[in-house]
Image (cartoon, grey):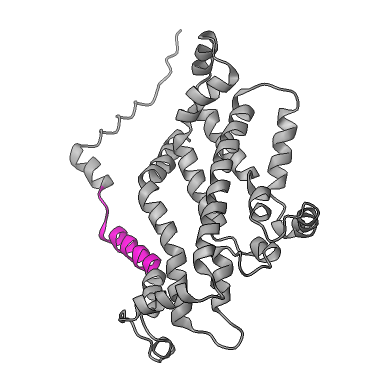
Amino acid sequence: MTTTTLRPPARPAAPAPTSRQAERLWKASPLTWFGLVLGVLLSLFPFYWMIVIASRTNDAANAWPPPFLPGGKLGENIQRVLDNGDANIVKGLMNSFLVSGTITVATVFFGSLAGFAFAKLRFRGKNALLLIILASMMVPIQLGVLPLYILMAKLDWLNTMPSVTVPFLIGGFGIFMMRQYAEQAVPNELIEAARVDGCSTWKVYWHVVVPALRPAAAVLGLLTFMEQWNQFFWPFVVLADPSNPTVQISLRSLNTAYFADNSQIFAGTLIATLPLFVVFVIFGRQIIGGIMEGAVKS
């Protein structure tokens, strides 16, 4: 006698979404547009408010209710900032360009080189070294101020640009970021093919790895430049000479202890912000493309 096992009837497959339904899934709703517009307005308002105050007199900047439209004193206030001998903002801009540019180039170069080594090369102690680099990212800079200041004094670098440049030529974040990107963006087969063609490790890095890491390098370069451009604490510690400041030290000199000229302070802030805006406009497409490509790869 044979027994038969009753099986439940198979469920019908879900119908594939039509083109109209797929288009509806990707179409932004009015609530999405409202959130995006609100986010843009909130992001741009501080910059607009800076322009409003920088284009008015100090009395108008302190008035209540505050003005919400730009005035006609922007050029005059900018000229006052440039003529302010205590702030020395032109020298501060030049020094910040030198320091931020040097640190950005060094961070991208050494970060990509070390990231390639940690991601694709085999050597003894690799995991231990990577762990030490990750641990260094957890130590705040304030804990190392005193020994670093003593080292700068022994090297006779106080009040000089090397004191604000050399300690930040490479960081753990840059190495870790480039290592994670190189792990996915550079296939092992491509490196092996370059080895077969007779390329040395340096040629593999320069001709194979660097082109693949360009999107991540653009993102790392912008983040590093912005961080160093806005750096205030360490330059304030080692640059005691007011004739050799960075741009953030120059902005601090505009705010005296006895009188705060808000129109002049905001005009100086506008001058210090414009280089970051120009950098983002020039390299914004590469930066956004690098972020999106990294998101797709992950």
Count of numbered marks: 0
Residue 298 in percent (x, y) is at 48, 35
Q: Is residue 35 magenta?
A: yes
Going 41% across and 45% down the picture, which residue do you hit? 287
As drawn, 162 above or below 64: above
Q: Is residue 39 magenta?
A: yes
As drawn, 19 above or below 140: above
Going 57% across and 55% down the picture, which residue do you hit? 228
Residue 201 or 184: which is nearer the viewer? 201
Residue 72 or 233: which is nearer the viewer? 72
Residue 224 in percent (x, y) is at 54, 50
State left or right for residue 123 relative to residue 181: right
Residue 59 in percent (x, y) is at 42, 91
State left or right for residue 41 relative to residue 251: left
As drawn, 193 above or below 217: above
Within the image, what quadrant is residue 65 found in?
bottom left
As drawn, 260 above or below 236: below
Residue 254 in percent (x, y) is at 54, 77
Q: Which residues are magenta?
A: 27-44
Going 36% across and 49% down the picture, which residue do you hit? 282
Residue 209 or 4: which is nearer the viewer? 209
Residue 131 or 238: which is nearer the viewer? 238
State left or right for residue 238 relative to residue 120: right
Going 25% across and 33% down the picture, which residue do you hit? 15
Within the image, what quadrant is residue 146 found in?
bottom right
Mainly helix, strand or loop, the magenta region? helix
Question: Which residue occupies the extreme left position in the image?
Answer: 20
